[in-house]
Amino acid sequence: MSGLNGAFRSKPSGRAASDPGLEGLHLETLSAGGGDGDEFGGRHYCHARGARNTDRSEGERRHARRKLCIAAVICLLFMAGEIFGGFLAHSLAIMTDAAHLFADFASFSISLFSLWVSSRPPTKTMNFGWYRAEILGALLSVLTIWVVTGVLVYLASLRLIYKDFEIEGTAMLVTSGCAIAVNVIMSFTLYQANHLHSHGGVTADATEPKPLTMAEGPVSGPQANPSVRAAFIHVVGDLLQSIGVLIAACVIYAEPEYKIADPICTFVFSFFVLFTTVTILRDVLLVLMEGAPRAVKFTDVQEALLALPHVCSVHDVHLWSLTINHCAICAHVCVDDIGKGEEVVREATVVLQTRFSFSVLTIQVEKFTEDMHSCRDCQEPSG
């Protein structure tokens, strides 16, 4: 739980008198409530959010599962057809495209399993839930395509070296043309349009007031489901390779002596597929390394907390992600009047949920003292 740590920042004029008797009061937002007329309407924060965020998360998972199921069926059916076409054409490029489809089908299956596991409720052992299973599924999917691509590059290299192969241009041309059509269909199936996240939930009601969400606040909106995103990148890579295979098929069909275009095409586009997975791997590793969410700026969170009434300083701020769209925060907030601690917790919770869409929050309230400026553990992190 160490996204960013040891941060201390205080208001320029935030000097509070010491009150040792009340120093160190600990209030967590999980128990923050309020009377009539406060921001929560007498409910603690997880109920104040209502069912909207829960429904949105479940709706996003259902939408992701539906996309992946459709893509998996299409992928499996055409993979069999492409293997048959590649066999007839004696084309390594088409067989490699079929191998990529197999890798895609495997990744779809892994992603579907991870989505199912991530929807399971928390346990005493896995008390954050199973959200990270989705990240592990995306990581395994990326590694699968890297291994398959490495094998394809090796086979293409053998053909470039020995040149002992023949290509049936007509069968290669027809099969590669069909491959493009199928990959376009799968790309549209997996494409995650922005309108899905722009209404603060799965569905939007223009007449119903709704709380500000990350999609509507100053930070960037919710990122695409990582499993669907990984699958989409795979399919885009296959589409580009299929285009290359079609070009090679046209060349070989017109001039059979240029059959070397088949392994060259495989070689070039295999490296392109590897390159397209780097961004997914970067996001996955950031989550696994407990890094701060890319969609939330550390300084913005600090400044939002410092802007609250009675808050003198903020330190020990930790930001991390359970998965791409589920962010967490814990922070120490120093106040000038410890009697206002519960009020500060309520206001901080509203800000952190509505402006930054944190789904897990813990706020510890402390009485501000002058020695916090020199405390080594309360200093802001570098970088």
Image (cartoon, rainbow, N blue to C red):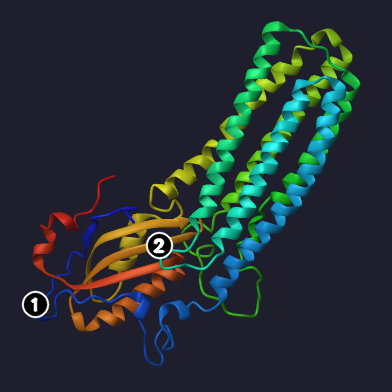
Q: Identify the residue position indicated by label 1 in the image.
A: 20
Seen at 65% across and 14% down, the residue is: 157
Mark 1: give few (<14), some (14-19) or many (20+) Cα within 10 Å. few
Who's the residue at 34% across and 56% down the image? 1
Q: 187 left or right of 220?
A: right
Numbered disc total = 2
Q: Where is residue 140 in the image (x, y as percent from the top left)?
A: 55, 42
Measured as percent of width and height from the top left, residue 181 is found at 82, 39
Residue at image mark 2: 328
In-image side of 370 versus 276 (left or right): left
Residue 129 picture location, percent across and down: 47, 63
Q: Where is residue 337 in the image (x, y as percent from the top left)?
A: 18, 80
Hey, what amino acid is under mark 1? Answer: Pro
Circle 2 packing at 10 Å, graded few (<14), some (14-19), many (20+), is many
Who comes first in sequence, dot 1 or dot 2? 1
Secondary structure under badge 1?
A: helix
The residue closer to the viewer here, 44 or 125, is 125
Label 2 secondary element: strand
Q: Which residue is drawn at 75% across and 21% down?
A: 92
Would you say the residues marked 1 and 2 are in contact, meaning their CB atoms lie under 8 Å apart?
no
Of residues 242 and 194, the one nearer the viewer is 242
Vertical placement of 154 versus 220: above or below?
above
Kind of residue at disc 2 = Ala
Determine if residue 239 is in view.
yes
Which image quarter holds the C terminus? top left
Which disc number belongs to residue 147? Answer: none
Mark 1 → mark 2, Cα distance in angstroms: 31 Å
- Based on the displayed image, in which of its 4 quarters is residue 358 positioned? bottom left
